[in-house]
């Protein structure tokens, strides 16, 4: 068997920054340390921090007053910031700057009187945060049918925005449907689907014709990981999204000659390598890394952490 290891794969700049922020906060403040939502959507990352005393919460009210809280890479609504202030929490904002960009666009369009059609997945942390910036002005659309069902006149003053981790192809179809329905619709200057999501999808698209099976590492609540598996399937290849080695079924690989291995933006590289080592052991697999696009993006730690020095 031959393994083609897709590059880029795994951690993006936003995930690296969020994890580094939590590491730094642990050094500076110790535990208990609270994180609002999962710091990134990956079970391994979350479990490892839990073991070190980090407490993940879904409600700010669960956090004792005067504690330290980190906001996850997916961002938060202003109401969450207000609730933190009310509890006198020391809040560190590890929101990915590419998510913040969408929040700022939402605020700008809302201020200019637009109805904003947000293309995204209902219930995703990022979508909840973005809608929270202008709840009265934002409508969520998830597919073409929902575009059809919008009760707005064709000349409505509308703008669109997208979640950062969508399928590039699906988003294009929905944006096309919006443009057809609302010829005057405006959008962001540059696509909101982030570079990491686009590059990981591009790598799968480029490499999938060469393989007969695709293994995607990532958690099931990771939007960009799910999109990678869906993309491979839509290209006609069997694909499985697994959280790690424990979810792999060796039978999947029977009679498979070439396997593409990739990972969503929140999946740690050691989990990828564990799976690759398993395939090498059990199927005598060789490994070829294929770089489809170079990445050199990095983000600074949140300002709340940059201004602090470690006290021994
Ligand atoms: S996937 Fe994109 S938007 Fe999400 S944290 Fe990574 S870089 Fe930021």
Image (cartoon, rainbow, N blue to C red):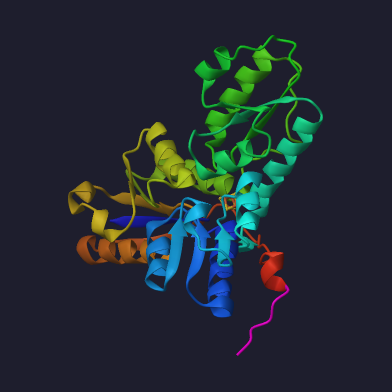
Q: Which residue is drawn at 55% across and 56% down?
A: 72
Lateral position of residue 16 relative to residue 237, left or right: right
Residue sitting nearer the eye, 156 or 64 = 64
Magenta stretch contains residue 310: yes
Q: In this view, does 231 lie above or below 243?
A: above
Q: Position of residue 94 (x, y in %)?
A: 61, 60
* Highlighted magenta segment, given as a residue range: 307-312
Residue at coordinates 41% horizontally, 46% vertically from top-left? 221
Residue 7 image point, x, y percent: 51, 56
The vertical placement of 219 against 69, above or below, is above
- Residue 77 seen from this side: no
The C terminus sits in image quarter: bottom right
Give the overall secondary structure of the magenta segment: loop
What residue lies at 49% left-to-right and 51% top-to-bottom?
A: 59
Name the side, left or right, on which 53 lies relative to 129.
left
Query: Image quadrant of residue 115?
Result: top right
């Amino acid at each position: 068997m031959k393994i083609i290891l897709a590059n880029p794969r795994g951690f993006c700049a936003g995930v690296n920054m969020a994890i580094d922020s939590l590491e730094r906060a642990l050094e500076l403040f110790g535990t208990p340390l609270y994180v609002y939502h999962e710091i990134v959507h990956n079970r391994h990352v979350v479990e490892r921090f839990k073991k070190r005393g980090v407490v993940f919460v879904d409600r700010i009210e669960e956090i004792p007053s005067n504690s330290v809280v980190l906001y996850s890479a997916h961002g938060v609504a202003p109401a969450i910031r207000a609730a933190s202030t009310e509890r006198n929490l020391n809040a560190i904002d590890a929101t990915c700057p590419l998510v913040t960009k969408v929040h700022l666009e939402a605020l700008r369009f809302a201020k200019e009187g637009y109805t904003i059609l947000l293309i995204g997945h209902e219930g995703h942390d990022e979508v909840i945060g973005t809608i929270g910036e202008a709840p009265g002005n934002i409508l969520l659309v998830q597919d073409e049918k929902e575009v059809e069902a919008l009760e707005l006149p064709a000349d409505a003053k509308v703008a669109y925005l997208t979640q950062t981790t969508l399928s590039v192809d699906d988003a294009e179809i929905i944006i096309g449907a919006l443009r057809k329905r609302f010829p005057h619709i405006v959008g962001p200057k540059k696509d909101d689907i982030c570079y990491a999501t686009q590059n990981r999808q591009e790598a799968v698209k480029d490499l999938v014709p060469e393989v007969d099976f695709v293994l995607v590492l990532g958690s099931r609540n990771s939007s960009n990981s799910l999109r990678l598996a869906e993309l491979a399937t839509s290209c006609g290849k069997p694909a499985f999204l697994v959280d790690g080695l424990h979810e792999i079924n060796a039978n999947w690989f029977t009679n498979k000659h070439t396997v593409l291995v990739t990972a969503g933006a929140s999946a740690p590289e050691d989990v990828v390598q564990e799976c690759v080592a398993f395939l090498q052991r059990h199927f005598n697999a060789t490994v070829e890394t294929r770089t489809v696009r170079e990445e050199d993006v990095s983000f600074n730690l949140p300002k709340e952490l940059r201004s602090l020095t470690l006290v021994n």
